[in-house]
């Protein structure tokens, strides 16, 4: 039998069975020597420390303790970290690439449900579903007639950020009759043309979009990138969707703008998160709040484990990893 390199899970033990259900776990066991009863939630645990000294591969996920230089020093044989979640910035200390580590992430797997959520919200917003629901609940009747100003034919959608999620959303929007615009400082005319979208500056996007959806990373340059000035540019009746990070939108300015009833918002993320119980956003009929659930939930979590299992098989058979993390791109990633 071929040698199976020693491996270890480093993530929340509570989450692990959802990410690695029995069928996915069997695929992992077929390729590595791994103790499935041991999950590293604390790298100072003596059992974990002992396994770490022998581990060649770490299978990480939500709840993984921070992997700093001291942890890497305690893992002299480590050659790969396969992360069954999104960004690795929160679990891996900078400089890991200097140790020759191969790092892979399932961020692309987590991008899909976020893009799907956003697509659904765009479709509903274009039909004015949220306001229609409020009117129907209040009036308990309706008149069957064509409602002017709603619908998704030719609806203008502005995407802020050609991130994994932003790009996946662009793909999902293609079968529909939307006009799609993009603002991203790292995507020029040729890149936008390849994506099939029209590149525009942020101000133009805010001013001309019926629906603005935020998919930029949370980095210093994007903090409060959507403030009072940008919100004031949005046309009357426009909708802001945020599934990225709450810090990209200035909350006080948003409260003030949606409080006028002029625009609406769909927020899966907020700043702070969760919102304080007294936040006006909870009571506004033109604000649709969800509790940070756009990302992988329920049966979608299994996809994360499948991505890691696929990458493990590629790694051990000498094939290129599909989702290898590029350290040069981390600075502008979420």
Image (cartoon, helix red, strand yellow):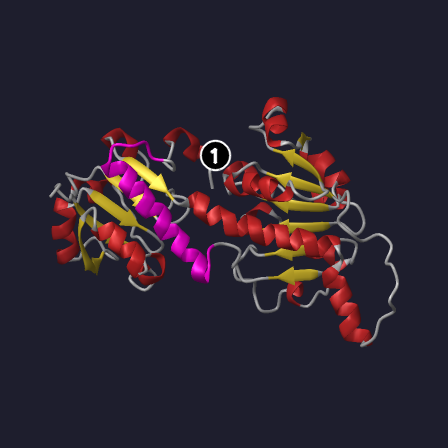
Q: Residues within 10 Å of mark 1 (few under 14, many from 20)?
A: some
Q: Is residue 308 magenta?
A: yes
Q: Is 218 on the left or on the right of 151, as rendered?
A: left
Q: Measuring 43% from the left and 44% from the top, which residue is drawn there?
A: 107
**Residue 235 drawn at (x, y percent):** 79, 45
Residue at (41% x, 47% y) in the render? 86
Magenta-drawn segment: 296-321
Residue at figure coordinates x 41%, y 44% from the top left: 87
- Does the magenta-highlighted stretch encompass residue 323? no
Nearer-the-camera pick, 313 or 51: 313
Residue holding disc 1: 332
Residue 12 in view, yes or no: no
Q: From where the camera sits, is residue 312 visible?
A: yes
x%, y% of residue 291? 54, 62
Q: Main secondary structure of the magenta part?
A: helix
Is the residue 180 above or below the residue 241 in the image? above
Instruction: Kindly indicate the quadrant of the structure image that contains residue 175.
Output: top right
Secondary structure under tag 1 reads: helix
Residue 20 located left or right of residue 113:
left
Report whether 177 appears left or right of 294.
Answer: right
Horizontal side of 20 relative to 99 (left or right) equals right
Q: Quadrant of the N terminus?
A: top left
Q: Residue furthest front?
A: 1
Say how many tags the image has: 1
Answer with the quarter of the image where residue 97 lies: top left
User: Between 286 and 299, which is closer to the camera in this rendering?
Assistant: 299
Q: Position of residue 186 (x, y in %)?
A: 55, 28
Tell me if residue 56 comes above or below residue 298 in the rendering: above
- Comparing 185 with 170, the one in front is 170
As displayed, is residue 201 above or below residue 74?
A: above
- Among all residues in the image, which is located at the extreme bottom? 140
């Amino acid at each position: 039998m071929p040698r199976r390199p020693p491996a270890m899970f480093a993530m929340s033990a509570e989450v692990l069975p959802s990410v690695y259900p029995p069928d996915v776990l069997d695929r992992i066991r077929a390729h590595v020597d791994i103790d499935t009863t041991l999950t590293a939630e604390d790298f100072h645990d003596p059992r974990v420390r002992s396994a770490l000294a022998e581990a060649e591969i770490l299978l990480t996920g939500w709840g993984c303790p921070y992997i700093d230089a001291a942890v890497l020093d305690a893992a002299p044989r480590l050659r790969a970290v396969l992360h069954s979640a999104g960004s690795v910035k929160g679990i891996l200390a900078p400089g890991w690439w200097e140790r020759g580590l191969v790092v892979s992430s399932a961020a692309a797997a987590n991008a899909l449900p976020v893009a799907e959520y956003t697509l659904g919200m765009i479709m509903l917003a274009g039909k004015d579903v949220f306001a229609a629901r409020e009117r129907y609940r209040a009036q308990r009747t309706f008149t069957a007639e064509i409602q002017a100003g709603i619908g998704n034919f030719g609806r203008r959608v502005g995407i802020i950020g050609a991130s994994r999620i932003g790009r996946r959303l662009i793909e999902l929007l293609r079968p529909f009759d939307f006009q799609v615009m993009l603002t991203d400082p790292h995507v020029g005319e040729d890149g936008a043309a390849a994506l099939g979208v029209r590149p525009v500056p942020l101000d133009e996007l805010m001013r001309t979009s019926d629906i603005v959806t935020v998919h930029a990373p949370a980095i210093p340059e994007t903090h409060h990138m959507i403030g009072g000035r940008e919100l004031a540019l949005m046309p009357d009746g426009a909708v802001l969707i945020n599934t990225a990070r709450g810090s990209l939108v200035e909350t006080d300015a948003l409260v003030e703008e949606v409080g006028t009833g002029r625009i609406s918002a769909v927020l899966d993320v907020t700043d702070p998160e969760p919102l304080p119980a007294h936040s006006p956003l909870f009571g506004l009929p033109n604000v649709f709040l969800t509790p940070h659930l756009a990302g992988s939930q329920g049966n979608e979590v299994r996809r994360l484990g499948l991505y890691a299992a696929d990458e493990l098989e590629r790694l051990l058979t000498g094939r290129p990893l599909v989702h290898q993390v590029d350290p040069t791109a981390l600075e502008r990633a979420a």
